[in-house]
Image (spheres, grey):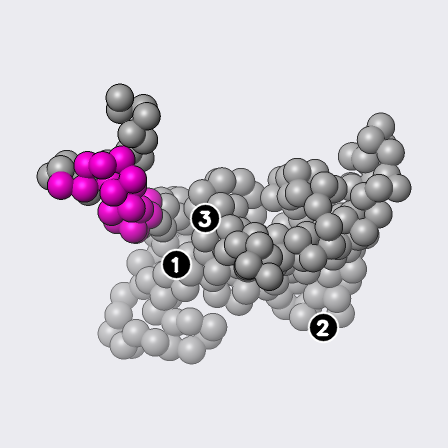
Amino acid sequence: MKNLFRVFVNGLVRENPLLMLMIGLCSSLAVTTSTANGIGMGLSMTFVLLMSELVISAFRKLIPDSIRIPVFIIVIAAFTTVIDYVLKAWFPGLSKAMGVFIPLIVVNCIIMGRVESFASKRPLSEAAADALGMGLGYTWVLVGISLVRELLGSGAILGMQVLPLSYTPILFFILPPGGFLVFALFISLNLFLKRRLRSPSAAAAAGCAGCEAAPSCCALPSKEAVS
C-alpha cells in the first residue's frame, strides 16, 4: 500500500508532468483560457491515461516488443475516441470550446510516455496508481492556470462574476502570452517551494546544516561527494 501511495504522489507532485517533466505543454497552454476547459481537458486526459495504462498493464506479457508502439497507439486512440464522443454527446459546448485538442490526446506525450515507461512493465495496481497520480497532477495544474487566467482576464470564474464590476479585465491573460506567463509563475513557485522543503533534509544529510548558504542550495552533494 505504501508503494502504491508513493507512486500516486510521485505523479501528483514530485514528477508532475507539467511542472517537473514539462511534457504535454501544447494542449495545457491552449485550453486554459477558462476553468471549464481546464477541468474538462484534465479529466479527459485522466480517463484516457487510466484506461490505457490498465489495458496495457493487463496485457503487457502478451504484447510482442516488435509491435508494442502500434498497439499502444491503438489502445490510446480507442479511449480518446470514447471520451471525444462522450463530450460531443453530453457536453457539446465544452467539446466545441476545446476543439481539436481532445482528439489530439492520442498523440499526447504524457500518455505515450507513461504507457511505454511504466504500464508496460508494472502490475495492474501500480499502473492504476501511476495513471491517477499523473492524470490528477496534470489536472490540478491545468485548473490552477485556468483559474488565474480566467479571473484576471475576465473577472469571473465558471461564468460567475467574482471581481467587482468596476474591475477592468486584463485581456493579456486570455491571450497565448498570458498563458506562458502564468505557467512560468507556476513553475517558479513550484521550484521555490521544492527548494525550501528539501534544503533542511539535504543539508542534514550532507553534514552542512549549520552553513548559512545551505538554504540557497537546490541540490547539495552527499558526504562522499564532498570528501
Task: Give neighbour class at mark 3: few <14, some 14-19, many 20+ (Cα, 10 Å).
Answer: some
Magenta span has 79? no
Q: Is residue 42 above or below residue 206?
A: below
Q: Residue at x 27, y 66 (%)?
A: 168
Q: Residue at x 63, y 68 (%)?
A: 93
Pointer 1: what residue?
149
Which element type, helix, strand or loop, lies under badge 2?
helix
**The residue stretch that appears in magenta:** 191-210
Quarter of the N terminus within the rendering: bottom right
Q: Nearer the viewer, mark 3 or mark 1?
A: 3
Residue 15's x, y, as percent?
49, 46
Tag 3 and tag 2, C-beta contact below 8 Å: no
Which element type, helix, strand or loop, lies under badge 1?
helix
The secondary structure that most of the magenta stretch takes on is helix
In primary-sequence order, the first of circles 3 and 1 is 3
Is residue 69 visible from the viewing direction of this image?
A: yes
CA distance for labels 3 and 2: 34 Å
Pointer 2: what residue?
90
Identified by mark 1, the residue type is Arg
Hey, which quadrant is residue 224 in on the image?
Answer: top left
Q: Is residue 166 above or below residue 96?
A: below
Q: How many marks?
A: 3
Magenta span has 203? yes
Is residue 84 visible from the viewing direction of this image?
A: no
In primary-sequence order, the first of circles 2 and 1 is 2
Pointer 3: what residue?
14
Identified by mark 2, the residue type is Trp
Hey, which quadrant is residue 133 in on the image?
Answer: bottom right
**181 left or right of 103 in image:** left
**31 left or right of 68 in image:** left
